[in-house]
Image (tube, grey):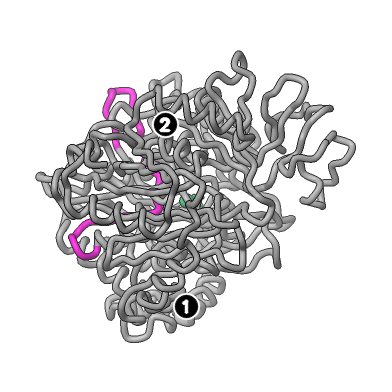
Amino acid sequence: MNRFTTNPTVLAWIEDMKALLTPDNVVVIDGSEEQLEALRAEAVSTGEMIKLNEEKLPGCYYHRTKPNDVARVEDRTFICSREKENAGPTNNWCDPKEMYAKLYDIARGTYKGRTMYIIPFSMGPIGSPLAKAGIEVTDSIYVVLNMVIMTRVGKEVLTVLGDSNDWVRGLHAKCDVDPEKRYICQFPEDNTIISVNSAYGGNVLLGKKCFALRIASYQGWKEGWMAEHMLILGVENPEGEVKYVAAAFPSACGKTNLAMMIPPAYLREKGYKVWTVGDDIAWMRIGPDGRLYAINPENGFFGVAPGTNEHSNYNALASTKKNTIFTNVAINNDDNTVWWEGLDKNPPQNATDWKGNPWNPSMFVKADKSTYAAHPNSRFTAPAVNCPCISSEFDKGAGVPISAIIFGGRRAKCAPLVYQSKDWKNGVFVGSSMASETTAAAAGAVGVVRRDPMAMLPFCGYHMGDYFQHWLDMGEKLGDKAPKIFNVNWFRTDDEGNFVWPGFGDNMRVLNWILARCEGKVDAVETPIGFVPKAEDIDLTDLEGFDIETLKSILTVDKDVWTKEAAEIEEHYKKFGDKLPAELRTQLENLKAALA
Ligand code: OXD
Ligand code: MN
């Protein structure tokens, strides 16, 4: 390590990690292609990774995790702040001293006979004023190779860091992948993350959820910026101007699809384009001109494979065609490529499923997920540069100015297709009460409302009441330069339970209304919840079988439904006790009064 840095805080921590983990070898990931190629070859030789068809999927590899280790584990994720109060009611908490002791006991000596890889990484373009550095140590080549795609890795990170202590320590130890001893712990006050007994993406690629959301949300609170679970996209109009929006959705609401959407043909012909800046996380700061600027701190997409196809998300699929790592999908043995449910209508006849067992389509029973070739949460890790619609701003450190913030969720009857909050404070109220209904795709009852404020429920690294206050404070600072806040709901259903709105690329019609509102170019109807479009202002050109009456049916604000909603929000707010900002209580009272 001394070859790469003289930073005393880095060198001391690495010595501590060596003493704790007792690796046989230590390798610093310098970011060179030779080193990475050697690691790929080693992973293939040990069976950790499978090299896929070089002609059809150049530079692509396959990996299987243990069947007990296929998703993030919220019940084993902890925020270890010194005071329990600071983790708040929505996080698991443990006293940091106790948790360090427990985790060190679990990790102690587990690198014996193994190599410790030291990964210096940057969240955000290296050197950007909005970026931050981290160092992850791991005993998994799979983690190294995924981190190389998902973040900016290499010795330049250490050069730019210099002697600063502003970097995040990340310890990952695979241990025995024992679910009983699996812990994903954040220590926000120490800039530290420790993850043990997992080898699955979201738990071990520590730059992503652990750093870029849980730790960074805390840093943002302390330092006056925001780390949000948001995609960032740019809409280019026929005049060539690009306006940017950031949008937060809970899982299973089509976030990656929206981030990479293709506008309907008639808009493309006019010259409209969508550019992707990010699909999952946004770091946002007030820029020199007083506006809110966002970067995507990541460098790749860790996307859910099942359901991704040429029609649902052409750009995501295209992003996976080279230099991609596939995890827990199926392998087509005839040509050594990959397959997953929903990729196409030609399942491979001779496949190996995600558990490593022989699979063919006759074994598939739709209602029984255990018969699926790919795990429902199987993933691709794809470099952002592969994306055909990646924004030219993606790699620039300055970030993009955000015109609109969009919240959304799956609501069969409640929220209209789109509405605009009355102002920033009211928008914070909308985000704080955000919710989504469970679908048949997840275990458990269908249609259960889960409140997921700003889609940050599993990712906020401190008390959510303080987080809401931080949002309100940011609005004060932004003043009239604040982005406008909207809510969308692509999932309203008719009386038979069918989705009414076509979604996907047609969501562009809604984005255009949102941007027109931001520019003050279009009127709206004021309702108790905010401003709803006049039906004639949503362009329905070429939308076959969809008329203005149908549109009106999903723009309605039903007072009875919303009165019930207000009561549920009141219940939801009780959790936050006296940390709930008074402003949000006022907002709720205003809503109730407007509905009465
Ligand atoms: C993700 C998630 O994987 O939000 O991005 O769960
Ligand atoms: Mn996410």
Residue 263, magenta (yes or no)? no
Q: Residue furthest right?
A: 362
| Residue 185 found in image quarter | bottom left
Residue 262, given in percent of the width and then of the height, sits at 49, 29
Mark 2 residue type: Ala
Check the image and report above or below for 1 versus 406.
above
Residue 71, given in percent of the width and then of the height, sits at 59, 54
Q: Residue at x 58, y 41 (%)?
A: 379
Numbered disc 2: secondary structure: helix
Classify the position of the N terminus by image quarter. top left
Residue 268, given in percent of the width and then of the height, sits at 45, 22
Q: Residue at x 64, y 55 (%)?
A: 493
Of badges 1 and 2, the one in the foreground is 2
Is 48 positioned to the left or the right of 164 in the image?
A: right
Residue 139, given in percent of the width and then of the height, sits at 47, 47
Q: Residue furthest left?
A: 288
Mark 1 residue type: His
Q: Crowding near pointer 2: few (<14 within 10 Å), some, many (20+)?
A: many
| Residue 436 found in image quarter | bottom right
Check the image and report above or below for 193 versus 32.
below
Q: Which residue is mark 2?
A: 384
Q: Which residue is mark 1?
A: 572
Using the image, tell me which numbered label, if any, was put on residue 512: none
| Residue 144 found in image quarter | top left
Q: Residue at x 21, y 61 (%)?
A: 474
Q: Residue at x 60, y 34 (%)?
A: 49
Q: Looking at the picture, tell me which residue is in the foreground, 414 or 254.
A: 254
Looking at the rendering, the stretch of residues picked out in magenta corresponds to 221-243
Measure how far apart labels 1 and 2 are at the Cα level. 37 Å
Check the image and report above or below for 98 versus 200.
below
